[in-house]
Image (spheres, rainbow, N blue to C red):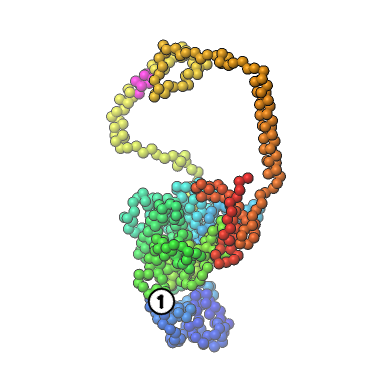
Amino acid sequence: MHRETMLLTSLHFLGFDFTYLGNRTKSFRSASFSVHQFLFPPMRAKKVEAPPQCVRRFCGTHENACAKARGRRARPTSEQQAVLPRLLWRGLSRPFKMLRVVSWNINGIRRPLQGMANQEPNNCAAVAVGRILDELDADIVCLQETKVTRDALTEPLAIVEGYNSYFSFSRNRSGYSGVATFCKDSATPVAAEEGLSGLFATQNGDVGCYGNMDEFTQEELRALDSEGRALLTQHKIRTWEGKERTLTLINVYCPHADPGRPERLVFKMRFYRLLQIRAEALLAAGSHVIILGDLNTAHRPIDHWDSVNLECFEEDPGRKWMDGLLSNLGCQSASHVGPFIDSYRCFQPKQEGAFTCWSAVTGARHLNYGSRIDYVLGDRTLVIDTFQASFLLPEVMGSDHCPVGAVLSVSSVPAKQCPSLCTRFLPEFAGTQLKILRFLVPLKQGPVLEQSAPQHNSQTRVQTCQNKARVRSTRLRPSQLGSSRGQKNLKSYFQPSPSCPQASPDIELPSLPLMSALMTPKTSEEEAVAKVVKGQAKASEAKDEKEVRTSFWKSLLAGPLHIPLCGGHREPCVMRTVKKPGPNLGRHFYMCARPRGPPNDPSSRCNFFLWSRPS
């Protein structure tokens, strides 16, 4: 019986559930439960209320749909029951390894992160990244907003022991955007590619499958991919039945739509459109697809803390795009059946307060006053068949976002060699000496000039000689310069205005009378009055200077200004500075020091506001 218990425990790690056997299996270690009962279970199921039609469509059979409705796993299908004896005879002492993927907007990869970094005094960003990967304990870690360019990427930061990494950099701005994917050596991808359009593809180890992008111009595609917002890695996975499949992960950091810049909203929607075209093309090619990262849009009102007070929440273009991309299992309308599923809402459809992003300026994370804009989206077949869990990690600090992830009941089949996009193959990290030609750009000349150059070669030489002779003849000799060696005249630094007529050199300007002739002698009384006025002026200047010095030392020794108390909590306020362009730019003001939260929460920030008086 102990041997049967070990086999059942191994089956449990494989992903099988025994709850469908009803009251006959109250425990794994029940003496009345045998392996024969598990391998050949009764075909009767408990009677439950039939689930909605859309759930039946996604779950497959009616029995599996009923199991889903009871909140339990579906019972093994006939194909699974057929393969079970073969798996048992191969040995079940080795558990089936799951695939764990995690996504995190890290908000800058070069700075050591609080809460995850080592507390040693010699800690650096590279050590912090290695510790982050170990703490997350994922086979594939996707990072967004790395804020690093290739010239600032160091080898300890890019090459971590036990992982192979892939980076996408912003080509327009330094310290902006950027994504990175770290894969364990046991999950080495077979292909990797930067961008969604294929313009940055190297034709060596690329993912491919671009779809129809005729609605985009080449300039638009280059602009969408030049900010380093997308990175693709393609992996080989093996299901528990032993079948190999292809899985493509799209690590994205979608643009933010600034209300003050309407062109960024257009850029964001075009990026969404390009992402959907590429993902659907990969699905059509037979690959499973996971889109994970920061999508910068809260899909449903439950995903935003203040959706009630936002104008036209449902009419947002980004939310409408997500409505067409995602499937809603609770909706019976066929118009809401998209190619992808929000994995977290699939497992937690009604979980409130499940946020992934908070404002760091207002301290909104303390009261969980945020939104959920980080997702793990999988295609419908992949989510229904292989996803075992989808989770958030709000306890992980160090960024204004928290990590999100999912667990799949598949194992990764590592490639024998990393794709060419891997950072260990970059010339600066490969250990090979660079040639100076790599830093030079060839000069591109027009074809017309190249053809006409041999014909006019002799004419160009003759003309060059003539120009040199003309230049020599126009140069002045030292004897002709005259007063060039001496001090120059002041008039040589001025040029006559073109609007004013120039005076003739023959006309002589009248000489001004001397100032002494215009001044009249002063009397003794006037001199006395002048002396008195001069003395009073000196006394007032000395008094003003003394007052300035006195006020300066008083302000210096008086300490900081008195901080007012907020009206809601009667607590000391905090001083802020206006950074928005306008007439109040740079002014200081006082506000409540508590973190931002719901208006009905008395522990959140009150509405106190007071301008600071200039010192």
The answer to whether residue 109 shows anywhere in this view is yes
Query: At 47% across and 66% down in the image, what residue appears?
Result: 308
- Vertical placement of 433 versus 369: above or below? above
Query: Residue 105, image x and y in percent?
Result: 51, 58
Where does the magenta region start and end?
464-472
**Magenta stretch: includes residue 455:** no
Query: At 43% across and 52% down in the image, what residue appears?
Result: 261
**Magenta stretch: includes residue 466:** yes
Q: Nearer the viewer, residue 420 or 309?
A: 309
Query: Residue 294, image x and y in percent?
Result: 47, 60
Query: At 32% across and 58% down in the image, what residue appears?
Result: 212
Query: Residue 286, image x and y in percent?
Result: 37, 65
- Vertical placement of 465 versus 46: above or below? above
Which quarter shows the N terminus?
A: bottom right
The dominant secondary structure in magenta is helix
Query: Residue 546, image x and y in percent?
Result: 70, 36
The residue beneath circle 1 is 55
| Amino acid beneath label 1 | Val
